Structures are given as structure tokens and as C-alpha cells.
Image (tube, helix red, strand yellow):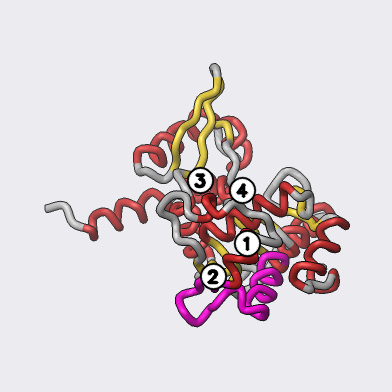
């Protein structure tokens, strides 16, 4: 008899392999990667990476995208990303072994600000969430919901299209445990639209080739004006 327990065991088996787990975590940056890129990232042969990718796609965690003769893969959607982040959030932040100045700089950049699939995390994501709660834009006591003032803020000062917030079946706002800060940042459709809007405004930019993001000078001014977030909170 097929049961939910069997489904859960199947999911656990997919993530039980270190290479498959590493591939899934790399895809948390929200981008589509080639099999070759993921093979180099995981330190395995391309043929080995392809086998793992096929298993992950069959299991519903990844989807394939083709552009011409090129094949890309990415996470199947926000729910998969949220599941992975929730699982990682159960562990204590690792104590990184600093092997070089470059590694230390990359680790510091991720802690300062990064994307968590399609929303903001790290000190930047937590600072924005704290500021929204302090201004009654977000209510953590009622299932982490946007207040009426919060909806007005998104569609007014921030300039997000109201239809984009309601698109799809994704929760409007949900708490996401930040694995470096050990505190909550804003996920869900609101978190995704916030991240997209700050990128469109050039308030945040990617830093390096990974998930790290940095606040631009324009962004520092904008966040101070909209949410009274001071630059010191983002360092």
C-alpha cells in the first residue's frame, strides 16, 4: 500500500545523497544552472551529475528548461526552496574554516545579505522584516500576515503591482528562519516581490557569482527613507 510515509521516505532518500543535496542547495540562488556547472560545483563528473539530476527531476524537486541546444535545471518552485531552507534552518550555523581571505570575504558577504531563492535573507532580510514589524506593516502574531497598512505600503510607496502580490497559490507572507541570523525574515509572495522591486530600483545588486547581494548607495538612502533602516544595521 502506498502511503504518505512512503512519499516522505522517498523524499528523504532523494536528499540523503550528499551530491544531490549540494546540487539542491546551489539552486537556492533561484537561477537555472547547466549540468556542467552543477558538476563542477559538486566536484563530480558530468555523467554523475546527470544521473543525480535525472533522479531529482523524477522526484519532483527540479525541473528542466531548454533553450536551443542548451539544457538548464532549476528548483521546481518556491515550495521546494522553502522546504530546503526550513531543513537547513534546523542546524546550527557552521563554523567556517577560513582557508583564505577570499573565502572569509565570501562568507561575510552571504551573512550580510543574500537571496533565499527569490527573497532576501541574511542581516539585510532580517533588518527589513524587523522594520516592517516595528511599523505595523507586518503582524507576526497572526500567522505572519501583511496588515492593511502593509498592503498599502507595498502598492503605494514601494510601487508593487497589487496583482503580482495575489498571483498564484503561494502564501502572501510567511516566516522563513534565517540560518545565519537564527531569526525570521519575510518569505512568500510579498518577500519575492520586495526582492524583485529592490533589484528593479537598483537598491540591491548581486555581489559576486553566488547568492550574496549588497545594498547600493541609492538603496541605503531608500531604505532609510522608507523604513528608517540605518546603514550600520546592514554591515
Q: Secondary structure at mark 1?
A: helix
Q: Is residue 166 left or right of residue 223?
A: left
Q: Residue at x 64, y 57 (%)?
A: 194
Sequence-wise, the earlier of marks 1 and 3 is: 3
**Disc 4 to disc 2, how far (Cα)?**
25 Å
Q: Identify the residue position indicated by label 1 in the image.
A: 154
Q: Which mark is residue 146?
A: 2
Between marks 3 and 2 in the image, the one whose residue lies nearer the viewer: 2
Crowding around mark 3 (Cα neighbors within 10 Å: few <14, some 14 to 19, many 20+) is many
Q: Residue at x 72, y 47 (%)?
A: 200
State yes or no: discs 1 and 4 in contact (Cβ < 8 Å): no
Sequence-wise, the earlier of marks 4 and 2 is: 4
Q: Is residue 5 left or right of residue 122?
A: left
Instruction: Determine whether 168 is above or below 175 in the image.
Output: above
The quarter of the picture where the C terminus appears is bottom right
Q: Residue at x 52, y 26 (%)?
A: 71
Where residue 22 sits: x, y (%)?
A: 54, 49
**Disc 4 to disc 3, how far (Cα)?**
17 Å
Q: Residue at x 49, y 61 (%)?
A: 172
State yes or no: discs 1 and 2 in contact (Cβ < 8 Å): yes
Residue 229 can be seen, yes or no: yes
Q: Secondary structure at mark 4?
A: helix
Q: Identify the residue position indicated by label 3 in the image.
A: 19
Residue at the top extreme, as displayed: 69
The verdict on residue 138 being magenta is yes
Amino acid at each position: 500500500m502506498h502511503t504518505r510515509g512512503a512519499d516522505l521516505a522517498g523524499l528523504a532518500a532523494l536528499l540523503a545523497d550528499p551530491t544531490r543535496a549540494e546540487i539542491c542547495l546551489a539552486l537556492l540562488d533561484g537561477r537555472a544552472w547547466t549540468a556542467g556547472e552543477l558538476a563542477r560545483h559538486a566536484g563530480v563528473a558530468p555523467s554523475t551529475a546527470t544521473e543525480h539530476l535525472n533522479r531529482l527531476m523524477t522526484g519532483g524537486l527540479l525541473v528542466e528548461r531548454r533553450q536551443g541546444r542548451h539544457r538548464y535545471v532549476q528548483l521546481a518552485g518556491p515550495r521546494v526552496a522553502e522546504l530546503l531552507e526550513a531543513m537547513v534552518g534546523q542546524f546550527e550555523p557552521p563554523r567556517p574554516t577560513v582557508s583564505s581571505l577570499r573565502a572569509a570575504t565570501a562568507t561575510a558577504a552571504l551573512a550580510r545579505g543574500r537571496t533565499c531563492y527569490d527573497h532576501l535573507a541574511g542581516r539585510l532580510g532580517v533588518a527589513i522584516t524587523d522594520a516592517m514589524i516595528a511599523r505595523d506593516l507586518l503582524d507576526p502574531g497572526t500567522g505572519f500576515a501583511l496588515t492593511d497598512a502593509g498592503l498599502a505600503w507595498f502598492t503605494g510607496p514601494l510601487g508593487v503591482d497589487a496583482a503580482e502580490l495575489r498571483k498564484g497559490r503561494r502564501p502572501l507572507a510567511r516566516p522563513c528562519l534565517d540560518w545565519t541570523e537564527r531569526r525570521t525574515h519575510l518569505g512568500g509572495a510579498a518577500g519575492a516581490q520586495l526582492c524583485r522591486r529592490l533589484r528593479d530600483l537598483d537598491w540591491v545588486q548581486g555581489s559576486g557569482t553566488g547568492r550574496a547581494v549588497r545594498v547600493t548607495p541609492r538603496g541605503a538612502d531608500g531604505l532609510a527613507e522608507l523604513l528608517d533602516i540605518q546603514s550600520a544595521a546592514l554591515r
